Amino acid sequence: MAKETGRKMIAQNKKARHDYLILDTYESGLVLTGTEVKSLRMGRASLVDGFVQIDGHEAWLHNVHVPEYSQGTWTNHSARRKRKLLMHRAEIDKLESKVQETGHTIVPIALYFKDGRAKVEIALAKGKREYDKRQTLREKQDRRETERAVSAVRRRQQS
């Protein structure tokens, strides 16, 4: 069988980008069982309620929903079990010190296969207030309107 190359997206957490201000991102490997990998290869997972917790200098991914593999037997995994993240010690220590500050958390942003290996992109984030969320949406809408106006002017100039 040929070796996989490239990046194949499995799941994204778009709500995290809306609810949190992303300060820094990290790529991490995951410790998975066989049926979890098979379920992920089918493209089924949800990061919506996920978060990362650091216990005893180890990073753990909690509440990520990887559904049971349909052809799995008694060896099947539980859907919301905690999974260990594979990160360098310096990265874990840096994240641990930042999380101890008030308002900081670690959330999963994306789950994907990179060159055949399951990876998760996690982000150090700070929670947004409701007015910050509205301001972000307003800025996004203003940016779209400006781009539309610029493209309309360019079209008129070309014709």
Image (cartoon, grey):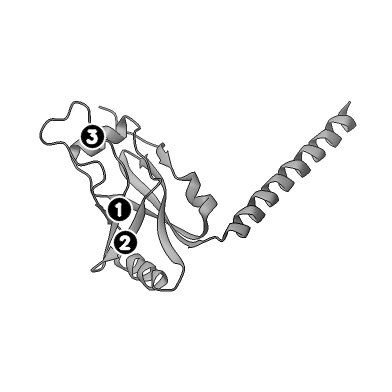
Label 2 neighbourhood size at 10 Å, few (<14), some (14-19), many (20+)? many
Label 1 neighbourhood size at 10 Å, few (<14), some (14-19), many (20+)? some
Query: Can you name the residue that lies furthest to the left here?
Result: 74
Q: Amino acid at mark 1?
A: His
Which residue is denoted by mark 2 in the rendering? 53
SS class, disc 1: strand
Report if the CB atoms under discs 3 and 1 are less than 8 Å apart.
no
Report if the CB atoms under discs 1 and 2 are less than 8 Å apart.
yes
Mark closest to the chain's N terminus, 1 or 2: 2
Q: Amino acid at mark 3?
A: Glu
**Residue 142 horizontal side relative to residue 152, left or right:** left
Which residue is denoted by mark 1 in the rendering? 62
Which residue is denoted by mark 3 in the rendering? 68
SS class, disc 3: loop
SS class, disc 2: strand
Residue 145 placed where, x, y %?
76, 42
Of 31 and 16, the residue lying toward us? 16
Mark closest to the chain's N terminus, 3 or 1: 1
